[in-house]
Image: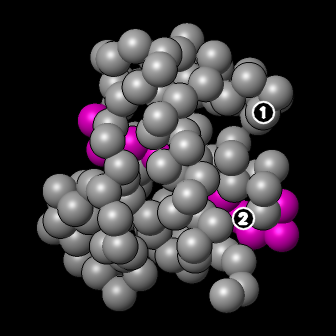
Amino acid sequence: MAEALGKQRFPGHRWRSRGLAVVPGSPTVQHTAVALGDMNEHVENHVPTLVTATDVEWADAVYAMTTRHVEELAQRFKTAAIRLDEQSDVADPFGDDPARYRRSLDHIEQAMLERFTAP
């Protein structure tokens, strides 16, 4: 969801969405498409992908949903520590209902607005 939202709201940045516990080749969760609504064009061909060291090296900054995710990224990818953002926790909606996905998307959007818009 963050990649699709970022591409729509902040097109001047490069975006990749990766996961820490992804089943390779699994489809995007249907509730994700529902929550994204008109942004769905950015996820139509998206296949959930496990984060790799190459992804971390590619990134100027790495944003994670939760503090636990930040800690796991720092442990797996020692070079990532200087680029990790620990500002807020977003509830992971995986396995929950569409309303939870929408609330998580709203939280992600608020976090992006705080980080990428001038005060």
Q: Identity of the amino acid at label 2?
A: Arg
Camera sees residue 49: no
Q: Label for residue 39?
A: 1
Local SS, label 2: loop
> What kind of element bears circle 1?
helix
Task: Point out the stretch of residues depicted in magenta.
Answer: 11-21
Up the image or down, 37 lies above or below 60; here it is above
- Residue at horizontal 54%, vertical 40%? 105
90 sits left or right of 10 in the view: left
Residue shown at the point (78%, 56%) measured from the top left? 9
Tell me, yes or no, whether the highlighted magenta stretch contains residue 48.
no
The picture places residue 27, in percent across and down from the top left corner, at 52, 15
Residue highlighted by disc 2: 14
Quarter of the image where the C terminus is located: bottom right
Compare residues 52 and 45 and report the one nearer the observer. 45
Say left or right for 50 vs 14: left
| Distance from Cα at disc 1 to Cα at disc 2 | 16 Å
Of the numbered discs 1 and 2, the one sitting upstream in the chain is 2
Packing grade of label 1 (10 A; few <14, some 14-19, many >=20) is some
Q: Is residue 11 above or below residue 16?
A: below
